């Protein structure tokens, strides 16, 4: 018994010593943290097409000590290669770490990518086991590497500011044609094979000390942007803050770039193709300006074939409430000041239909089926689809069924 008790005491002492040693290491040692380059987290990637292949730019958040305070640091590295995969490997050769892209939530395609097949450019990201299919994708004006270099007004990473311009909130208000890798692949695999993504543009933020500004398109939709005082570039020189917007939309047909939708055309596309919770429309009725809010919206398309002729009906419904008015101010105290009368409802309907007709003209001109007509024909009238599948829109009549009623 005495020997057993001695062993128990020794075990307790050893256990106590081990716990004390671990606590000492925990509070006094960094456990030999890996090199900062190996700890960098790639949060965004930019792709540009060059004469010799591709430039791939990785923007990485660099971990900083908690006691350091301030904003997280970030770095940017560009690799080159004949393929996107080789360019990523070049980043590995330059930095000593291989970007696994597990936290990459943004892929920016430079304007030069318009000369290549979209899915040839994106092929690496679909094959890479680490890249999440929820990563947002957008095309930018100019060079993706230069876009990612720009400093937003809040002094953070450009990728974060761009993602805010492509956020779910802006998608839900029909102000951004937000898509990710998964949605792009679904569109490519459909019979319509028409793909689209936000077209990212940058400009100089308005001076004024960190407030936010809102750009407004001609259809009245607002696009959140950041603005504020100028920051400093990574080279120590002064440069003005930049703001990022995604009010327009880049369009592809079977992976081939066909053009950029205007703000009004993009607005119509978002009303039809993506779930919109609340949209804002400016309209004019009897010479006065009104801003109308649209909620409880629903957009879609129906197709039918009669007498060997196809007909596509674009549907949209919404409840409208008055946001601003030049004739019926809320300060008058009327309880019904938020209601929309028939004349204004007709004007709103005409405004929305005009945006949709403009989108239709773009689709017909470029033989790009953004309405999804071919997919509908394939599902509901396959025989007719086989006859017209190479040029679906030219053989279709398109009509609009838009129902906008006042709230209450």
Image (spheres, rainbow, N blue to C red):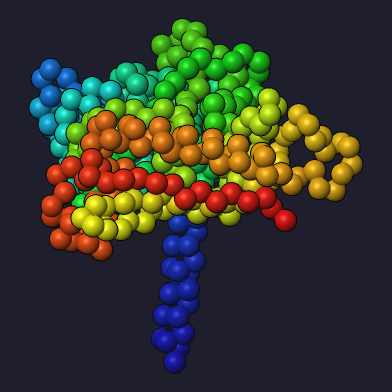
In the figure, residue 90 lies in which quadrant? top left
The C terminus sits in image quarter: bottom right
Q: Is residue 372 left or right of residue 53?
A: right
Q: Is residue 127 left or right of residue 102?
A: left
Q: Which residue appears farthest toward the right when viewing the image?
A: 333
The answer to whether 287 is drawn above or below residue 383 in the figure is above
Q: Please tell me which residue lies in front, 330 or 31.
A: 330
**Residue 278's x, y, as percent?**
58, 46
Residue shown at the point (45%, 10%) measured from the top left: 236
Q: Please tell me which residue lies in front, 218 or 24.
A: 218
Residue shown at the point (58%, 31%) measured from the top left: 220
Q: Is residue 299 left or right of residue 194?
A: right
The answer to whether 330 is drawn above or below residue 114 in the figure is below
Q: Is residue 271 left or right of residue 290?
A: left
**Residue 48's x, y, as percent?**
23, 24
Taking the image as drawn, is residue 317 in sight? Answer: yes
Q: Which residue appears farthest toward the front when viewing the image?
A: 307
**Residue 185's x, y, as percent?**
25, 49
The answer to whether 164 is drawn above or below residue 386 in the figure is above
Q: Which residue appears farthest toward the top when viewing the image?
A: 237
């Amino acid at each position: 018994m005495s020997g057993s008790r001695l062993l128990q005491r020794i075990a307790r002492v050893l256990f106590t010593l081990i716990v004390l040693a671990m606590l000492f290491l925990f509070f006094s040692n960094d456990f030999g943290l890996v090199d900062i380059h190996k700890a960098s987290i790639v949060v965004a990637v930019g792709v540009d097409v060059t004469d010799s292949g591709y430039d791939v730019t990785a923007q990485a958040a660099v971990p900083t000590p908690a006691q350091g305070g301030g904003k997280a640091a970030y770095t940017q590295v560009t690799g080159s290669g004949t393929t996107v995969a080789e360019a990523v490997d070049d980043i590995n050769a330059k930095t000593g770490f291989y970007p696994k892209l597990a936290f990459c939530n943004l892929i920016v395609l430079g304007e030069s990518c318009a000369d290549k097949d979209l899915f040839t450019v994106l092929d690496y990201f679909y094959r890479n086991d680490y890249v999440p299919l929820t990563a947002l994708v957008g095309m930018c004006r100019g060079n993706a590497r230069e876009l990612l270099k720009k400093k937003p007004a809040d002094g953070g990473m450009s990728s974060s500011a761009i993602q805010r311009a492509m956020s779910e909130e802006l998608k839900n208000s029909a102000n951004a044609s937000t898509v990710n890798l998964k949605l792009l692949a679904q569109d490519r695999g459909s019979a319509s094979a028409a793909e689209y993504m936000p077209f990212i543009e940058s400009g100089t933020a308005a001076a004024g000390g960190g407030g936010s500004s809102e750009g407004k398109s001609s259809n009245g939709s607002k696009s959140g942007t950041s603005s504020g005082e100028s920051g400093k570039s990574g080279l120590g020189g002064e440069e003005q803050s930049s703001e990022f917007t995604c009010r327009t939309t880049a369009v592809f047909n079977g992976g081939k770039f066909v053009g950029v939708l205007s703000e009004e055309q993009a607005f119509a596309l978002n009303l039809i193709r993506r779930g919109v919770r609340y949209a804002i429309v400016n309209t004019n009725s009897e010479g006065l300006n009104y801003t109308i809010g649209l909620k409880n919206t629903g957009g879609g398309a129906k197709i039918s074939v009669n007498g060997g002729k196809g007909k596509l009906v674009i549907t949209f419904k919404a409840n409208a409430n008055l946001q601003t008015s030049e004739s019926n101010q809320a300060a008058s105290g009327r309880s019904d000041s938020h209601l929309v009368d028939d004349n204004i409802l007709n004007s709103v309907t005409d405004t929305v239909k005009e945006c949709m007709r403009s989108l239709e003209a773009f689709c017909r001109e470029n033989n790009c089926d953004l309405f999804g007509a071919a997919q509908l024909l394939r599902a509901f009238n396959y025989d007719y689809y086989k006859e017209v599948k190479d040029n679906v829109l030219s053989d279709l009549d398109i009509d609009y069924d838009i129902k906008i009623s006042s709230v209450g």
